[in-house]
């Protein structure tokens, strides 16, 4: 599948914006300057090398973001005990029972009495 230089550039900008521009825009400026510097390149082999490097960078950026997202979502170290048990139960198709809360139970009884 032949990917155009423009689509690689757009995808790189999207990925950089997702990851790095919340704090500063240094990476966006650098990416734009690299593409501007190589705007006049006409040699097809050099263009292919530049596109391959850009695709590799894009794959690395996407993979590192996805790895971080998965690590944050499923890391046993990050998750609190209750959430980890709930996720384990959900994986096998079970649901945890609701926890008893004395304050809510009293108001539920009162509300149920009046709404009969």
Image (cartoon, helix red, strand yellow):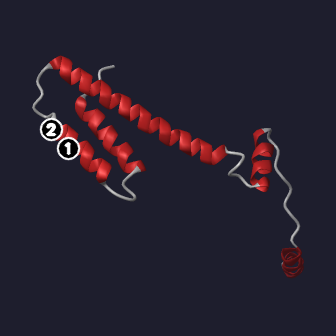
- Report the residue at 89% width, 75% height from top: 102
- Residue nearer the viewer, 64 or 3: 64
Q: Secondary structure at mark 2?
A: helix
For the C terminus, the image quarter is bottom right
Q: Quadrant of residue 31?
A: top left
**Residue tagged by mark 2?**
37
Binning the other alpha carbons within 10 Å of mark 1 as few (below 14), some (14 to 19) or many (20 upward) gives few
C-alpha separation, residue under disc 2 versus residue under disc 1: 6 Å
Give the left or right position of residue 100, taking residue 71 as reference: right
Is 106 rendered above or below residue 56? Answer: below
Residue 70 in the image: state x and y as whole percent: 59, 42
Give the residue furthest to the top.
45
**Residue tagged by mark 1?**
33
- Residue nearer the viewer, 73 or 102: 73
Is 41 rendered above or below residue 100? Answer: above
Residue 6 in the image: state x and y as whole percent: 23, 34
Query: What is the number of the mark on residue 103?
Result: none
- Report the residue at 19% width, 21% height from top: 46
Q: Quadrant of residue 69?
A: top right
Give the left or right position of residue 58, taking residue 65 as reference: left
Q: Are marks 2 and 1 in contact (CB under 8 Å)?
A: yes
For the N terminus, the image quarter is top left
Q: Secondary structure at mark 1?
A: helix
- Report the residue at 30% width, 52% height from top: 26
**Number of marks present in the image shown:** 2
- Report the residue at 37% width, 28% height from top: 56
Residue 74 in the image: state x and y as whole percent: 67, 44
Residue 36 in the image: state x and y as whole percent: 16, 40
């Amino acid at each position: 599948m032949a990917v155009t230089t423009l689509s690689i550039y757009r995808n790189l900008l999207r990925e950089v914006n997702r990851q790095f521009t919340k704090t500063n825009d240094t990476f966006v400026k650098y990416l734009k300057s690299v593409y501007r510097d190589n705007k006049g390149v006409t040699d097809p082999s050099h263009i292919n090398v530049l596109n391959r490097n850009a695709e590799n960078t894009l794959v690395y950026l996407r993979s590192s973001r996805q790895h971080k997202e998965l690590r944050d979502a499923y890391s046993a170290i990050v998750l609190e005990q209750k959430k980890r048990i709930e996720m384990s139960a959900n994986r096998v198709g079970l649901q945890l029972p609701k926890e008893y809360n004395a304050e809510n139970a009293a108001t539920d009884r009162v509300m149920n009495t009046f709404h009969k």
